[in-house]
Image (tube, grey):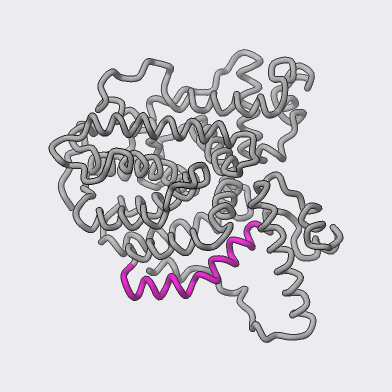
Amino acid sequence: MQGIRQIDRSNRRDPSARGPYAKSAVTKRLILDSARDLFIRRGFDAVSLRDIATASGLSHPALRRYFDSTAAILDALVQRYELENYDGVLDAVHQVGALEASIDLARRNAEHVGYIELFTALAGVAASAEHPAHERMAARYRAVREAAAAGVGPGRSDAALVPALVDGLQIASLFDPRIDIPTEVALFVAWWRQGGIVRVPSIGVVGNSGHVPFAADGTRDRILRHAAENFAMRGYYSTRVSDIASAAGIAKSTLLHHYASKQDLLISVLVDLERRSSGSGDPAPDLPPARVRRFVDLACVDASATEDEVAALEAHVVLLCESTSPEHPGHAWYSDRISDARLTLAADIAASTTSGVREVSSDRAALWLHAARDGLRLQWIYDRELPVTHALRGLCVSLVGDSVPSDATPSRA
């Protein structure tokens, strides 16, 4: 698993160290532990440096001698876990291979209290190319995909499905705790090894023809556009209503005339993002196979994406990851939408599957498709060359058979 070796181990120190460093290390560990508890309970963006200083029993200036931002603390927390996890994952790679090691990694992530919440938060806040952790996260994703590719064989662009599925399941579990991530990953890997996945021809650059651009006219539409941009750049909690009003070129009072509160504006942004990513408002196709195709086609994104599509996807990724915290005002909205969409997709898959192609239940197939979609789109934010279209359509072929797009002719791997 070549990519695993790229994990930065430079922060490891001799645990027997004494003197000033030992005291500093204890204080730093106290800060990180306190921050971890606050991030898990409230959500990353709802926690300030002063909150962490208070929880750590330190003054604000004293804490800033160690960390100058909450983002730096979050990044350090994720790195600390990955350093602790490094040897165990490497052992699993050597013993069972890269693909099966993903099962062990999923189990470790699930058992490490708070890691899934913290990693998801970091993946969301670092989505912006300007974020200091963006390049490190991009390098991490590349390393993980290279490792997965080594485990499934050369030339398999659909190897991106495995790490994407893990990411997507982790996000889904924060909205639905009933999801057993290690079990789902183990079943997916076993299904893959037994020939469940199929290979489809390279489809090329197709874009997302269903995307609806931001509306150019109207005060309400202008507010929504600038609210989405600000939420994507700063996160919900760090964005002020006055920031959005200023960007939209209106007074704060005018904004509040249209949207009574920041929370009201957030929900309106989420509804608008969903509307624009689900097509032009045309009714859904009548036949279940066509609805499954529509779900996949609308989820596809590639190098041909316009600036408007990228901006909408970044806003969605940031807000989805941020809303995994139960206290976030978007949490209930996402929970309801995800649950309803998965149930609908499961019913359509059950009515679409042909000649025994699918070897898993329709509920599980819907879960895997949703998780792969979210994981692939998250990783695409960090690598615009990621073959989202090819990987997602290939998975759809594998699970549903002849109801997939007609330009993808499957062959068993």
In the displayed orientation, state which residue is furthest to the front.
178
Q: Which residues are magenta?
A: 74-97
The residue at 66%/15% (across/down) is 219
Could you tell me what secondary structure mostly forms the magenta stretch?
helix
Picture quadrant where residue 392 is located: top left
Q: Quadrant of the N terminus?
A: bottom left
Residue 204 visible to the viewer:
no
The residue at 34%/38% (across/down) is 366
On screen, 15 above or below 140? Answer: below
Picture quadrant where residue 270 is located: top right
| Residue 292, percent from left and from top | 30, 30
| Residue 24, percent from left and from top | 77, 74
In the displayed orientation, state which residue is furthest to the left.
355
On screen, 160 above or below 226? Answer: below
Q: Is residue 303 magenta?
A: no
Picture quadrant where residue 114 is located: bottom right
Q: Is residue 11 left or right of residue 316?
A: right
Q: Is residue 232 left or right of residue 275?
A: right
| Residue 250, percent from left and from top | 75, 19
The residue at 60%/67% (across/down) is 80
Q: Is residue 267 left or right of residue 20?
A: left
